[in-house]
Amino acid sequence: MVMRSKAIIKWPKQVTTSLVEQLIKSERNVEKALTVFDSASAEYANGFRHDHTTYSLIISKLLSVNQFKRAEDFIDRMKTENCKITEDILLSICRAYGRVHKPHDVMRIFQKISDPTIKAYVTVFSILVDENQLKVAFKFYRYMRQLGFPPSVPSLNVLIKALSKNESTMDSAIKILREMPKHGCTPDTYTYGTLINGLCKLSKIKEAKDLFKEMETKGCSPSVVTYTSLIHGLSQSNNLNESMSLFKEMESKNITPNVYTYSSIINGLCKNGRSLEAIEILQIMITKHHKPNMVTYSTLLHGLSKEKKIPECLAIFDRMKLQGLKPDAGLYWKIIELFCDDERFDKAANYLDEMVFEGVPIKRVTWGIHVKIHNSVVRGLCKGGNDGNRGFQVYCRMRGKGICVDVETFEDIIGFFCGKRDFEKAVRVVGEMVVDGCCVGEGVWSDLVYGVCGKGKVEEGGEADESISKAEDSPPFTQLIILKLKFILQK
């Protein structure tokens, strides 16, 4: 029996490969798994020696956490210990590099395989296609053929996938399908599914439907992936009835829809103004133990917000957060925009505060959304007797984060403070407006000067002279004159 603790591992006198495998597999922590690996061969001087099985397992553990350098170090260690480096071990590293989009490293590792089999060539060919390295992929395929590898269903399927990525080569992909029998290769479900997916992405729905019918006549049963590709294509092209019909057909054939199938149906319903029906599909999806993903929720929220379904929108938004998914700036914008359109700016501000509190990142692609959100909320809060002081707080936060303030937003803030006769803050905002290089309208200047001078309360000329005289000695008035001069010089 093996007694283990966090500090040491007590090995039996007879250490076996299966025992070492079992212990490494049971360790979720990679560092602990490495400790098991090293201690197994270090315990007895003439005892256990690792073979390609245990090496493969520890390399797999390292690759699962993207520790590629350490995984490759174990390949070097295998060489020094004269341990057989199998093709499968090197291909596992190739796949791992492909997963993190490093095709050049894939090719580097592939070159370490001595006398690679057709499986190795097809694996690398597939990775290059998945990474859209099509020029290199086609060159690699030609090299395979030059080496004398005959066409096979797996290699032709990958070639069809590559050709299906562009409209200009789609006809060539279909031509290969037609010529496969000449090479002794029978198209399978994957062949047809790949072509149908490519055609749908290129909006060639009629051709995709024709192939879908053909594959059934050839004895190829459509998979969930094939159904999902066609359902998604039909939904995108507003053929919702056909899409729903296929969805029901799947159930009748006992083909279980996946997350992407449900999301495609939800997308189609939302695009056609049937977001409440989409919620029903979401409920079915959850009862079937499929977890909605970010795409599912985003699609549904966009549809609900478009139809102004505020309560439903908030319910889905909360469900999404409860599932542990973090809404991005675009989704917060949908919620905030709904409240702004409904003139419930206090609620809009609450969600803006939540977005800031949750630390939703301001990225280049979402910069414009952040600008829209903040300006809309500030303008709404400063208009029509709303909470302008809160609007001013949001404005100050905007400036602190370097978020651009629109001219209209500046003017609404100034108008709010003029209405409250808080001219010091109004003048301060004008100053920041001038610093930002915004054009201050003559109406804003006039309102401020008249406000500072108290013109609204002055009726007689003598009183006006006295009011203006007092105003000229006040800090806001002096500041206004300086700002006006700065503005003129900028122009």
Image (cartoon, rainbow, N blue to C red):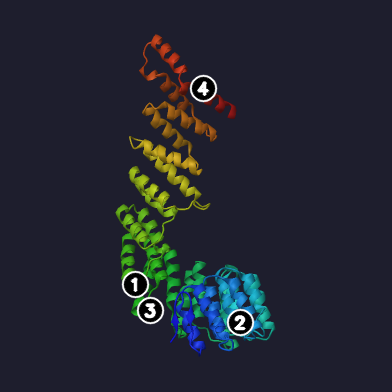
Residue 58 to residue 299: above or below: below
- Residue 229 placed where, x, y %? 45, 71
Marks 4 and 1 in Cβ contact (< 8 Å): no
Name the residue beneath numbered marker 3: 255
Q: How far apart are marks 1 and 3 (CA)?
A: 15 Å
Residue depicted at x 41% and y 54%: 331
Name the residue beneath numbered marker 1: 289
- Residue 408 placed where, x, y %? 45, 36
Between 168 and 358, the one nearer to me in the picture: 358
Q: Distance between the residues labelled 3 and 4?
A: 76 Å
Q: Quadrant of residue 129?
A: bottom right
Q: What secondary structure is marked by label 2?
A: helix
- Residue 294 placed where, x, y %? 42, 62
Between 140 and 272, the one nearer to me in the picture: 140
Going from N to C along the chain, the mark reached first, 2 or 4, is 2
- Which disc is residue 481 wearing? 4
| Dot 3 amino acid type | Ile
- Which disc is residue 120 wearing? 2
The image quadrant where one finds the C terminus is top right
Dot 3, crowdedness within 10 Å: few (<14), some or many (≥20)? some
Q: How far apart are marks 2 and 3 (CA)?
A: 32 Å
